[in-house]
Structures are given as structure tokens and as C-alpha cells.
Image (spheres, rainbow, N blue to C red):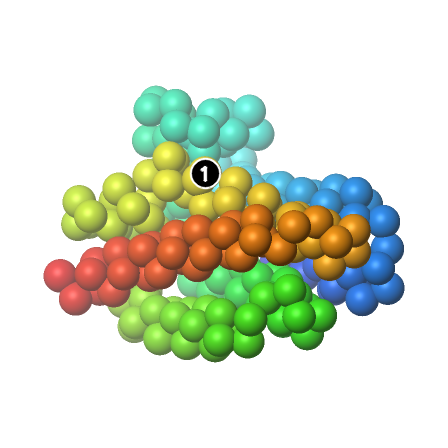
């Protein structure tokens, strides 16, 4: 099994543990640390996929610099990612599947414990189902060509932004459920995250039909 795929599966298993701990009202600090670890692994599996193509030509620090917006490193990483998407289409879809599994488990568990409204879960599932179908029909989302999609979907600013919002929202929801933190903040963060997800979905659909 490819290291990237094994990392993706481990990330999914880690979030399954998080879901169980939430149900048990475990210490939310531990839960937040595990969520952070799972989100960090999303970058690690990407590095392993690129490393398989690049070999010793790229280090983890160079990959990280590219992810954080360094222009020279980003150009190199993007070139390798395009090679990855051509060589291993299964790996690209596996990564998307892992992302969806992680996100769905968190949305479902928070809906189950009544800190996220059911209609939010419906929005997320419908959005991902249709957008993923559209994007799968054209291959991979790593080759954005339209300016709108490049800014909203592919840019380091927006990619980093949604990861920060996801971490804050999913972490705070644990605090709201277990330690009874104010729910209005939970609803605010959830609303921002859903808006972010919908905006990126619009960018993907725009890209696919342009």
C-alpha cells in the first residue's frame, strides 16, 4: 500500500476515535489535539504522494513552504502534483474519499449530539455529492484553470483559511457539547464554515463548466 493511502486511512481511523470520545464526553482538549493531528496528516499524505514521484528532489520543508504560499516552492510542488494526478488517479480519489469520510464523521457526530442542526448535514452531503460528481467527470481538482477557481479553491490563502475555520469550528463544537460553551459561537463558526464550503463548491462547479 502506498504511504499516502496508508496515511489517509490512519487519518480516517483517528477521526473515528474522535467521534467515540465525543460521544463519551471525554476531555475536549484531547479531542481537539486529535482533530489537529488528523488535519495535519492531510498535508502529510499529500507529501508522501509527491515524494513517490519526486524522490529526493523535494523535502518535507520544501513541500510545506509550497503549501504555505512560497512561490518558488509552490510552483515545484504543483508540477509534481500534476504528475501524481496523472500517474495515480486512484490515489487522488482516495485522498478525496478520506477527506469526505473525516468531514462526514464529524458533521454526523455533532448532528447526533444536537450541536449542529440536521439541515446543515443535509446541505453538506448534497453539496459534496454533486460537486464531487462534477469534478470526478473532469478528472482532478488540482488543475484549476479559471481565475475564480484558482483564487477561491487553489490559492494558499483560501486553502489555509478553510482548514483554519474547520479546525476552529469542529474544535469549538466539542467544547460546546462537553463543557457547555456558548452555543451562539458554535452556530456562528458553523455558519462561516458552511459558507466557506459552499463558496469553494461554487468555484469547482464554475471551473467544471467553463
Q: Position of residue 67 (x, y in %)?
A: 45, 33
Pick the residue in front: 201 or 52. 201
- The relative height of residue 112 versus residue 83 in the rendered view (above or below) is below
**Identity of the residue drawn at 53% across and 57% down:** 187
Quadrant where the C terminus sits is bottom left
Name the residue tied to disc 1: 160
Pick the residue in front: 50 or 127. 127
Is residue 169 visible in the rendered image? The answer is yes
- The relative height of residue 86 versus residue 40 in the rendered view (above or below) is below
- The relative height of residue 62 versus residue 46 in the rendered view (above or below) is above
Quadrant where the N terminus sits is bottom right
Query: Is 162 positioned to the left or the right of 147 in the image?
Result: right
Circle 1: element type: helix
**Identity of the residue drawn at 33% across and 31% down:** 75
- The relative height of residue 111 versus residue 70 in the rendered view (above or below) is below
Q: Position of residue 142 (x, y in %)?
A: 34, 51
Quarter-of-image position of residue 12: bottom right
Dot 1 crowding, Cα within 10 Å, few <14, some 14–19, many 20+: some
Query: Is 17 positioned to the left or the right of 6 in the image?
Result: right
Pick the residue in front: 107 or 79. 107
Amino acid at each position: 500500500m502506498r504511504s499516502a493511502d496508508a496515511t489517509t486511512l490512519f487519518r480516517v481511523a483517528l477521526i473515528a476515535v474522535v467521534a467515540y470520545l465525543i460521544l463519551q464526553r471525554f476531555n475536549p482538549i484531547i479531542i481537539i489535539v486529535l482533530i489537529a493531528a488528523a488535519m495535519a496528516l492531510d498535508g502529510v499524505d499529500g507529501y508522501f504522494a509527491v515524494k513517490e514521484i519526486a524522490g529526493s528532489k523535494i523535502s518535507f520543508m520544501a513541500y510545506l513552504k509550497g503549501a504555505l504560499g512560497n512561490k518558488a516552492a509552490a510552483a515545484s510542488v504543483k508540477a509534481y502534483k500534476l504528475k501524481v494526478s496523472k500517474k495515480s488517479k486512484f490515489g487522488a480519489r482516495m485522498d478525496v474519499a478520506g477527506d469526505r469520510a473525516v468531514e462526514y464523521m464529524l458533521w454526523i457526530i455533532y448532528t447526533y449530539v444536537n450541536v449542529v442542526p440536521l439541515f446543515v448535514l443535509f446541505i453538506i452531503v448534497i453539496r459534496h455529492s454533486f460537486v464531487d460528481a462534477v469534478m470526478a467527470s473532469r478528472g482532478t481538482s488540482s488543475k484549476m484553470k479559471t481565475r475564480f477557481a484558482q483564487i477561491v479553491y487553489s490559492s494558499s490563502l483560501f486553502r489555509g483559511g478553510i482548514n483554519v475555520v474547520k479546525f476552529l469550528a469542529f474544535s469549538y463544537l466539542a467544547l460546546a457539547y462537553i463543557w457547555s460553551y456558548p452555543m451562539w459561537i458554535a452556530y456562528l463558526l458553523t455558519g462561516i464554515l458552511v459558507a466557506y464550503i459552499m463558496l469553494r463548491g461554487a468555484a469547482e462547479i464554475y471551473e467544471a463548466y467553463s
